[in-house]
Amino acid sequence: MSFQNILFESKDRIAYLTLNRPDKLNALNWQTMQELQAALTSVKEDGNVGGVILTGAGSKAFAAGADIGELAQQTPVSAKEFSLNSQEILRFIERFPKPIIAAVNGFCLGGGSELALACHMRVASDKAKFGQPEVNLGIMCGNGGTQRLPRLIGKGRAIELLITGNMIDANEAYRLGWVNHVVAPEQLLPKCEEILQTVFKKGPVAVQLTLEAVIHGMEMTLEEGAQLESNLFGMLFSTEDMKEGTKAFLEKRQANFQGR
Ligand code: COA
């Protein structure tokens, strides 16, 4: 599979997707979004891949937002369509059955931040900068930022960032809960790999259903979410992994999970 705006490779069960328009700070034009979806579709079907690291090419940016040149061409009708189509891709990412970590290596702004927010976790280099600067352009988030940011960091903090357009550094993003970890630039990929390699040792079906419970459950009432959790919990007792996991514990050995 060959792409123009992303790099895509797999190693040690991890798919590495790199936004690759460094001269434009990896701004997300429509083609890049479509390539991302196509690459992730193939990752979803690839049984040899257990998780994804999404990052940006170059040392300056994860992604500095939606491509402003493309945005400038939109009409009210096409802008709504553009937003709906992008939202669909981000839903695909959010509901992805394998963990996706955004490795944020630099500017993470606007649509770039919204993309990172749709990932399951965010790890930042201490050089990263975060912000939702849409209001500087006289527009607002169109890729879920007004919805996912408050759910992640709280309403008041999100509103301040969304309506001031202020940029914050990685440590402030960590303090707010926007990112899971902040590390030196050279530790960014190793930290993401360490997280995924830890996950890969666990029961794969349990990991997949846990993601499903959290992502879908967050959109439900507590009662509905708890019901979903009970259903998925019960389902796990039909897996060989559950039998192996409990047996291995009782036999005081490492579990050998098969993912079924
Ligand atoms: N869309 C399209 N092109 C973008 C872009 C975006 N979101 N962000 C940066 N670029 C392009 C610049 O136009 C420039 O291209 P050029 O060299 O062909 O002129 C190149 O990337 C480098 O950006 P530049 O502004 O020169 O870098 P900088 O270090 O001076 O500033 C930023 C970095 C991130 C502060 C600045 O690029 C910026 O504010 N970008 C827009 C951020 C934004 O508003 N995002 C939300 C969009 S909804």
Image (cartoon, rainbow, N blue to C red):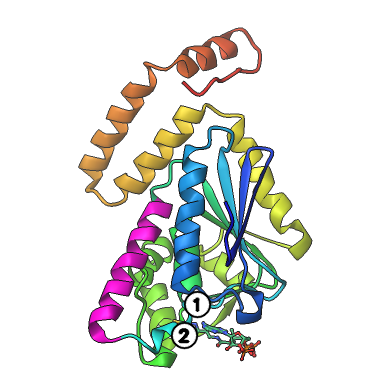
Going 50% across and 77% down the picture, which residue do you hit? 65
Q: Is residue 52 left or right of residue 66?
A: right
- Which of the pair 25/234 is nearer the observer? 25
- Which residue bears the numbered disc 2? 68
Q: Is mark 1 within 8 Å of ligand 1?
A: yes
- Which of the pair 169/116 is nearer the observer? 116
Task: List the single residue furthest toward the top.
Answer: 251
Task: List the single residue furthest toward the front.
Answer: 2
Indicate whether residue 77 is drawn in magenta. Answer: yes
Separation (CA) of disc 2 from disc 1: 8 Å
Q: Is mark 2 within 8 Å of ligand 1?
A: yes
**Where is 195 relative to 176, above or below?**
above
Task: Name the image quarter holding residue 58.
Answer: bottom right
- Residue bounds of the magenta highlight: 75-94
- Closer to us: mark 2 or mark 1? 2
Going 43% across and 46% down the picture, which residue do you hit? 96
- Which residue bears the numbered disc 1? 65
Is any atom of residue 98 visible in this view?
Answer: no
Q: Quadrant of ligand 1?
A: bottom right
Answer yes or no: do the residues labelled 2 and 1 have beta carbons within 8 Å? yes
Amino acid on which the number 2 mark rests in the picture = Ile
The local secondary structure at tag 1 comes to loop
